[in-house]
Image (cartoon, rainbow, N blue to C red):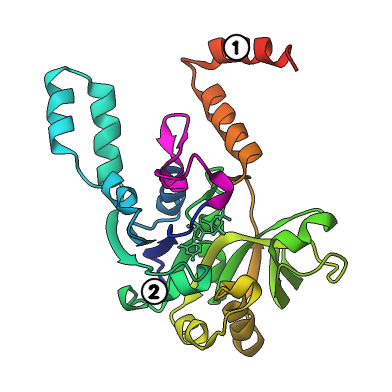
Amino acid sequence: MKISKVILPVAGWGTRSLPASKNIPKEMLPIFDKPVIQYVVEEAVRAGIHDVVFVTNRHKSVVEDYFDRSVELEELLEREGKTKQLEAVRNVAAMVDVMSVRQKEQRGLGHAVGCARNMIREDFFAVMVGDDFIVGDDAGLVQLVDAAEKYQMPAIGVMEVPADKIDKYGMVAGTEIAEGVFRITDMVEKPALGTMDSRLAIVGRYVLPSEIFDYIMRQKPGRGGEIQLTDALAAYMKEKGMLAVKMKGHRFDAGDWVDYLTACTYFGLKDEQIREPLKKALAAVLKRF
Ligand code: UTP
């Protein structure tokens, strides 16, 4: 099993991020010096993936443009001897090969993945949502690729959430077969509080078989009137089995303001140039609250 392609749906409305996401896709909002989507794509690259299929809509072509060359800008930076910036701009364009497909109506994550069906020739492929990412060299999608290859089975990423948050996520229950690897026994999209003992929440990373498209096409609208990916996965899981892998590292959901601002601060503090001035500025601001 070789996973070489990722479907990356970025066609949602991003209502939680309004008004910032009114004209700029939330996937393009900056976290320190890079847009959210670059962190997501870098996580795919760490998992050995270099082919990206963006599922976009008519307002989001800027996402795929970001990973294209910008020849005039590169010439300008070269002329002005701005080598660091030139390298950063060239790196983005060289990172991955990009394809894209339109989701013409926002009918949910399952529907968005289904829109990319004709772009997938491989037996297995990855899916990542475009607005959250996991930091840590051996964390995130790479763990799923490893587990899927080892057990020759589809695998989805999970993280533990508190009992009072299970109604915000697709949740799974399972039997642990190796440290942090579970054979899934149950899967429910946003269960009501108190209806599930498991704390394992799906966090937007998947390694899936191409057969999953048949299950997606059969799905009727579920929760919120959307075609839910979780419903298609649950149907597949019951017939053929699926793994859940506990994600290591730290996950940031850029659609959530607390996570978004924490991520900006985290990456700012990681940068040696601005660490000390940023710490001073933050300390001064914190005194006011
Ligand atoms: P979210 O539910 O987090 O994104 O979907 P959203 O709908 O854009 O955001 P809010 O909740 O209104 O703030 C997870 C991912 O799936 C994509 C989104 O772009 C996001 O990356 N998505 C969602 C689609 O591509 N199409 C859809 O119909 C729904």
Q: Nearer the viewer, residue 47 or 52?
A: 52
Looking at marks 1 and 2 on the same chain, the residue that comes earlier in the sequence is marked by: 2
Q: Residue at x 84, y 64 (%)?
A: 193
Could you tell me residue 116's position as x and y percent?
Answer: 37, 72
Q: Amino acid at mark 1?
A: Ala
- Real-space Cα distance between discs 1 and 2? 46 Å
Could you tell me residue 95's position as x and y percent?
Answer: 30, 47
Q: Nearer the viewer, residue 253 or 225?
A: 225
Q: Nearer the viewer, residue 149 or 25?
A: 25
Residues at badges 1 and 2 in contact (C-beta under 8 Å)?
no
Could you tell me residue 273's position as x and y percent?
Answer: 46, 15
Label 2 within 8 A of ligand 1 by Cβ: no
Q: Residues within 10 Å of mark 1 (few under 14, many from 20)?
A: few
Quadrant in the rendering for residue 287: top right
Marking on residue 189: none
Q: Residue furthest right?
A: 194
**123 shown above or below 34:** below
Q: Residue at x 77, y 61 (%)?
A: 166
Could you tell me residue 191's position as x and y percent?
Answer: 76, 70
Residue of label 2: 115
Residue 201 falls within the magenta-colored stretch: no
The residues colored magenta run 15-36
Quadrant in the rendering for residue 93: top left
**Secondary element at tag 2:** helix
Q: Is residue 91 rendered to the left or right of residue 218?
A: left
Residue of label 1: 281
**18 shown above or below 193:** above
Whether residue 10 is visible: yes
Q: Amino acid at mark 2?
A: Cys
Q: Is residue 77 rendered to the left or right of residue 243?
A: left
Label 1 within 8 A of ligand 1 by Cβ: no
**210 shown above or below 80:** below
